[in-house]
Every structure is written in C-alpha cells, then in structure tokens.
Amino acid sequence: MSIKIKLAEKAKDVEKALNRYLVIREPKKLYEAMAHIPLAGGKRLRPVMAQLTCEMVGGNGKKAIPFAAALEVIHNFTLVHDDVMDDDDLRHGVSACHTVYGLPTAILAGDSLFAYAFEMIAESDVSHKIITELVRHTAYTVRRIAEGQQMDINFEDEETVKPELYLEMIRLKTSILFGSAAYGGALIGGKNVDEANELRQMAIWVGLGFQIWDDFLDATAPAEVLGKPSGSDIRQGKRTLLVIEALNRTNNNERKELIRILDDTNTTDNDVKRAVQIMSECGALDNCREQALEYLNGAKKTIKKYEQGEARTMLEELLEYMVTRGH
C-alpha cells in the first residue's frame, strides 16, 4: 500500500472531525468560506503526525483527534491568509478563498478558523493540565508562525539574505507547526514535556526538509502536482534557499539576470524557465536537495529509540514522504 493511501486511511477520523466542525450555518457566506480550503483536500500531514506520534509513544491515537484536527484548521487559516498576501489564485487545486468569497470575507474566514481551533483543542479527552499546555503551546506556535511570515515578507525587499536567516524563517513559518503536532501527540500519549520536546525537535527537522523540498518542487514540478501555479516563488520574487544559493554561486552576469527576473513584476513563463536553468547549472538545485535529505536523516535517527511497531514504521514512511514527494 502506498504512503498516500496510508495517509488517507489514517486521516479518516480527522476528516470526519473537520466535517463535523466545519458545518455551514448563518452567516452562510462566512462558514462556506471557512470550509472552502480545509475541506478541499490536502495531505493532512500535521494531524497524521500528531496521531502517529501519540501512538508511537504508547498512547491512544483517537484521543489526539481533536488536537490533530485543530492543527489542520490552523494550518488552513494560515493558507487562507497566505494566499491573500501572495495574491495566489489556486490552493489544493481549487480557487483560493479570497478569489471566491472576496477579500474581506476571506480575512474573516481565516480569523474564525484560528479561533475555532482552540474550541476544538478544549474538547480533547485528556486532563485539564494537558489541555492547558496544548492551548498555550498552540498560541505560542501561531505567534511564531506570524514572525516567520513577516520575515518572509521582509525578504522580498532584499536582494539576497543569509542562508541562516532563511532557515530561521522557514523554521518559524513552516517547521514549527509540525513540531507542535509531534509535541502535542507525545503529551497526549503520556510523555512528559522534556520527552515531548525531543520529538518536537524531530518534527522541526523534518519540517525544515519539507519546506526546502517544497521550494525545490515549486521550481521544478508542474502545476498539477503542486496544486498551484508552477514557479510562483520566482514570480513573487521570494528569496528562497534555492535563490540564495544561486546568487552565491553564479557569476556576475547570471546573478544580475536572476535578480532582474525576481524583481520583475511581469515575470513570464520563459523568465521562470530561465531562472530554474540558472539554479540548476550553478548547483543550487542539487545543494538544496542534499540539505533537505540531511534534515530527514536527522529526524529519522530521533525516533529509532522507540519500539518498532506499526506507528513508528508509518511515521518513518511519513517523514520519508515529506522530503521526497513529487519526484
């Protein structure tokens, strides 16, 4: 059975929870907008990671469902707002929320999803102490995600940024929510805060690999694989690790050409192809692929201490999929 099928099977309880929570009520337009992206599909990587981590440490994965669904709702709230900021038209293969329901309603939908997540966490069948920690940690995580998003926006005004700053940005914007999934799953499964933090770091590592690989896919995979236009990072002038590495590796003429493409507000398909060619020829693509795999290997080492079983095996498969998908 492929990992995609396994993920879909594992996520069924989360799908049921999402459909139960995201019912359409009045005002209808708001609740339709709230459900538009979360129920459009997606890989459900974060909720499945929460479930599998809970089970790997000896807990009951069913008890992690409200928290897991809440993380998926938070992830989707960030996507709704991200599409507004980036002016992207597609998400999960459907029209972005703001293109269907308008900008004001999309903002309200994102805000409402964020708030709803905490209602979902509060329904968890765990002790009040654990619920309190899940709420605290989730709120902290969302604040740090916003910091990462602001860093990403700031980078668009820079010709280039240091690789370590970019890695910190994606740690905050992307990796940290994976960290929350493993952290919460471990707490629900009965682990203490120190043990949960070790698994949080594991998930942050794989989240870094996931985002670097996502940047790699954005430049190399077709739109039907991405669920959004290919090369959107290049069109938006984003200084991804691919771009940073390319700017550090190219000669003066290619560097100027790449910067021109990134700063052009009317980037063509041919411009995108040329940018990808420059990244490939200078070795930036290969370098980023190698970095993503290094983070994957670090994450896989962390879970070797846990007893081999169905949950650990599937978690290992999940980690592998996150950093090798699409190619």
Image (cartoon, grey):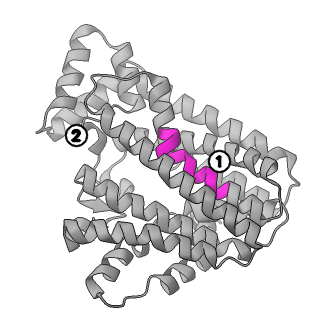
Q: Amino acid at mark 2?
A: Arg
Question: What segment is highlighted magenta in the picture?
Answer: 170-182
| Cα–Cα span, label 2 and label 1 | 30 Å
Position of the N terminus, as image quadrant, is bottom right
Are there few (<14), some (14-19), or many (20+) residues within 10 Å of tag 1? Answer: many
Q: Is residue 148 above or below residue 143?
A: above
Q: Which labelled disc corresponds to residue 203?
A: 1
| Residue 19: % across, % down | 49, 83
In screen coordinates, is 1 left or right of 93? right
Q: Secondary structure at mark 2?
A: helix
* Residue 286 at least partly seen: no
Q: 37 or 23: nearer the eye?
A: 23
- Disc 2 target residue: 235
Residue drawn at x 29%, y 56% as measured from the top left? 83
| Residue 10: % across, % down | 64, 71
Q: 282 or 32: nearer the eye?
A: 32
In screen coordinates, is 30 left or right of 323? left
Q: Which labelled disc corresponds to residue 281?
A: none
| Residue 219: % across, % down | 34, 39
Residue drawn at x 37%, y 67% as measured from the top left? 111
Q: Amino acid at mark 1?
A: Ala
Q: Is residue 172 magenta?
A: yes
Given the current orientation, which residue lies at the most extreme bottom position? 25
Residue 254 lies in what quarter of the image?
top left
For the stretch drawn in magenta, what is the main secondary structure?
helix
Q: Is residue 230 magenta?
A: no
Q: 112 or 4: nearer the eye?
A: 112
Looking at marks 2 and 1 on the same chain, the residue that comes earlier in the sequence is marked by 1
| Residue 140: % across, % down | 56, 52
* Residue 14 at least partly seen: yes
Q: 27 or 313: nearer the eye?
A: 27
Q: Is residue 275 above or below residue 305?
A: above
